[in-house]
Amino acid sequence: QVQLVESGGTLVQAGGSLRLSCAASGRTVNTYSIGWFRQAPGKEREFVSAMWWTGNIYYADSVKGRFTISRDNAKNTVYLQMNSLKPEDAAVYYCAATTPYSSGKVDYTGAYAYWGQGTQVTVSS
């Protein structure tokens, strides 16, 4: 079992930067794959980025080159650095964790067993 708590969401101007944090408790994050998803009003939850337990990193095409996922094992925390933010990046951002050593599909919400409560990111134009 793992508990996830996101933080860092706030209002930011277009072109600005923000760093989201996903603090995990219960288990060490390096045996889990951690993903970031987002959901805007009236839209489905969509994949943003993931750091797989193998060390592989994945990004959605819409954020590639602007967002960076990283992990601090000592703090048991995964980060999502978001640069050059656009109004279309505004959403509730969720982090999620798979079961240990998962072989699930990276961008599929069903592959993740644990979810945080979400943090709101608002981007003003």
Image (cartoon, helix red, strand yellow):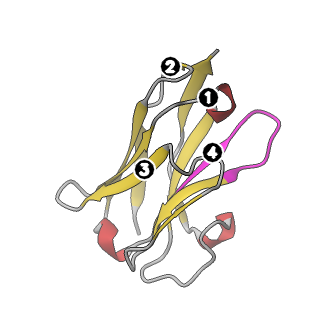
- Label 2, label 4: how many angstroms apart (C-alpha)? 16 Å
Mark nearer the viewer, 4 or 3: 3
Give the residue number, with chain letter if any, for mark 1. 86
Q: Position of residue 109 (x, y in %)?
A: 66, 63
Q: Which residues are magenta?
A: 36-46
Give the residue number, with chain letter if any, for mark 4. 38
- Label 4, label 3: how many angstroms apart (C-alpha)? 15 Å
Mark nearer the viewer, 1 or 4: 1
Mark 2: few, some, or many residues within 10 Å (few <14, many ≥20)? some
Please, what secondary structure does the residue beneath circle 4 have?
Answer: strand
56 with respect to 86 (left or right): left
> 56 above or below 79?
below
> 70 above or below 80?
below
Residue drawn at 57 percent across, 68 percent down? 112
The dot on residue 65 is: none
Q: Amino acid at mark 4?
A: Arg
In the picture, which quadrant includes the N terminus?
Answer: bottom left
Of the image marks 1 and 2, the number of the one nearer the N terminus: 2
Give the residue number, with chain letter if any, for mark 3. 68
- Label 1, label 2: how many angstroms apart (C-alpha)? 10 Å
Circles 3 and 1: CB distance less than 8 Å?
no
The dot on residue 12 is: 2
Q: Amino acid at mark 2?
A: Val
- Label 3, label 1: how many angstroms apart (C-alpha)? 15 Å
Q: Which is nearer the eye, 82 or 2?
A: 82
Q: Position of residue 78 (x, y in %)?
A: 35, 54
